[in-house]
Image: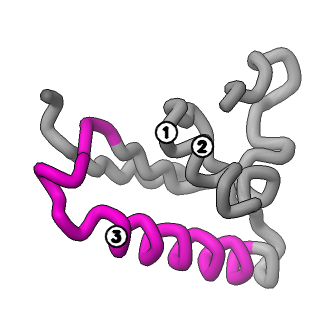
Amino acid sequence: MNDFTVVTKHHTDRTEITVSGEMDLHTSPRLAQAATIILNVLVRLRRRMRAEGGRLAVTGLGSQPARLLKLTDTYDLFTADAAPVGHGARPSV
């Protein structure tokens, strides 16, 4: 199993947060609660970014995070216009 990591990179025009690794109910018993909290944070951050004239795009989603966004009907909020022109299609879930 891959270790769970979060890496933040600040650029002049954006901030990238890369989350990688694996989590499951065995490694994280509170996974469902954590997923709810993370989704809530993303929604609030998106609102704040839009209010300040910015945008929040979630890119490079694996199938499970993409499925979570689809199930919660938030996929389009975070992936619409996320990829620059010519950079692949959305992942299927």
Indicate the amino acid at tag 3.
Ala
Quarter assignment of residue 46? bottom right
Indicate the amino acid at tag 1.
Gln
Picture coordinates of residue 30, whole percent (x, y):
23, 69
Whether residue 57 sits left or right of residue 42 in the image: it is right
Closer-to-camera residue (7/36): 36
In the image, what residue occupies the spot 87% across and 24% down? 85
Asked if residue 22 lies in the magenta stretch, the reply is yes
Picture coordinates of residue 64, whole percent (x, y):
49, 39
Question: Magenta segment, principal secondary structure?
Answer: helix
Which label sits on residue 34? 3
Asked if residue 61 lies in the magenta stretch, the reply is no
Q: Quadrant of the N terminus?
A: top left
Label located before the other in sequence (3 or 2): 3
Would you say the residues marked 1 and 2 are in contact, meaning their CB atoms lie under 8 Å apart? Answer: yes
Which label sits on residue 64? 1
Indicate the amino acid at tag 2.
Arg
Query: Is 57 placed above or below 92 here?
Result: below
Which label sits on residue 67? 2
Picture coordinates of residue 9, whole percent (x, y):
39, 49
Picture coordinates of residue 35, whole percent (x, y):
42, 65
Dot 3, how many residues are within 10 Å of its Cα: few (below 14), some (14-19), or many (20+)?
few
Dot 2, how many residues are within 10 Å of its Cα: few (below 14), some (14-19), or many (20+)?
some
Q: Which residues are magenta?
A: 20-49
